Image (cartoon, rainbow, N blue to C red):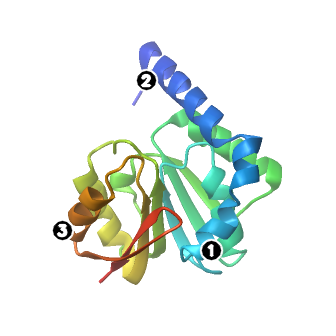
């Protein structure tokens, strides 16, 4: 679908803010995304689904956590985020990531193909949280993990909502809510 000039402008502005907040040297000094993602459960060889990859701060960490045997699917609805991340990955010669400019509610991933899915600080979900959770539930393997890092003080509300979709709350670790697929 072709974007209007106004839509392009809004996506560029939005990505500018996201890039400023989530792709800077200070943040990288404070947080090692690869180590953080390992602590919350990503393992070598995992297939990972990242919802809302933005400029790739966590994507790069996920590629490190899964190692060369793993795979990361990084999705974002913002075409500028996907273009930026694709260039960043090419410059680093990272090959185990598929960046998609698409809505994660229609991932195109196979049923029961994902070991770990995560999203961080997404204030709203394009297509709605209900549609996203249905898709996540479909693609997660049995025993797989969904990690959500809430952007507001709404962890209890998110937990209740996610559990309605058959995912069981496990714990909170490093500000992420961790759920298991059944």
Q: What's the mark number on residue 164?
A: 3
Q: Among all residues in the image, which is located at the extreme top?
A: 5
Whether residue 113 sits left or right of residue 55 in the image: it is left
Whether residue 40 sits left or right of residue 154 in the image: it is right
Residue denoted by label 2? 3
Describe the element under mark 3 as helix, strand or loop.
loop
Q: What's the mark number on residue 159?
A: none
Residue 72 location in percent, x, y? 58, 64
Residue 129 location in percent, x, y? 27, 52
Q: Quadrant of residue 22?
A: top right
Q: Earlier in the sequence, mark 3 or mark 1?
A: 1
**Residue 63, can we see it?**
no
- Tell me which residue sits at (54%, 55%) in the image: 74
Q: Earlier in the sequence, mark 1 or mark 2?
A: 2
Tell me the quadrant of the picture where the N terminus can be found. top left
Q: Are marks 3 and 1 in contact (CB under 8 Å)?
A: no
Q: Earlier in the sequence, mark 3 or mark 2?
A: 2
Residue denoted by label 1? 38
Whether residue 117 sits left or right of residue 61 in the image: it is left
Describe the element under mark 1 as helix, strand or loop.
helix
């Amino acid at each position: 679908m072709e974007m209007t000039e106004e839509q392009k402008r809004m996506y560029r502005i939005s990505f500018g803010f996201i890039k400023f907040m989530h792709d800077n040297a200070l943040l990288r000094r404070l947080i090692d995304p690869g180590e953080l993602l390992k602590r919350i459960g990503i393992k070598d060889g995992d297939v990972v689904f990242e919802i809302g990859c933005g400029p790739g701060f966590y994507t790069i960490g996920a590629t490190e956590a899964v190692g060369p045997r793993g795979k990361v699917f990084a999705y974002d609805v913002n075409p500028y985020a996907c273009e930026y991340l694709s260039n960043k990955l090419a410059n680093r010669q990272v090959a185990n990531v598929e960046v998609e400019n698409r809505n994660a509610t229609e991932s195109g991933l196979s049923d029961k193909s994902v070991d770990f899915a995560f999203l961080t600080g997404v204030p709203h979900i394009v297509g709605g949280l209900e549609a996203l959770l249905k898709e996540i539930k479909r693609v997660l393997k049995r025993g797989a993990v969904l990690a959500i890092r809430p952007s507001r003080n709404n962890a209890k509300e998110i937990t209740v909502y996610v559990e309605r979709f058959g995912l069981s709350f496990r714990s909170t670790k490093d500000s992420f809510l961790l759920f298991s697929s059944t």
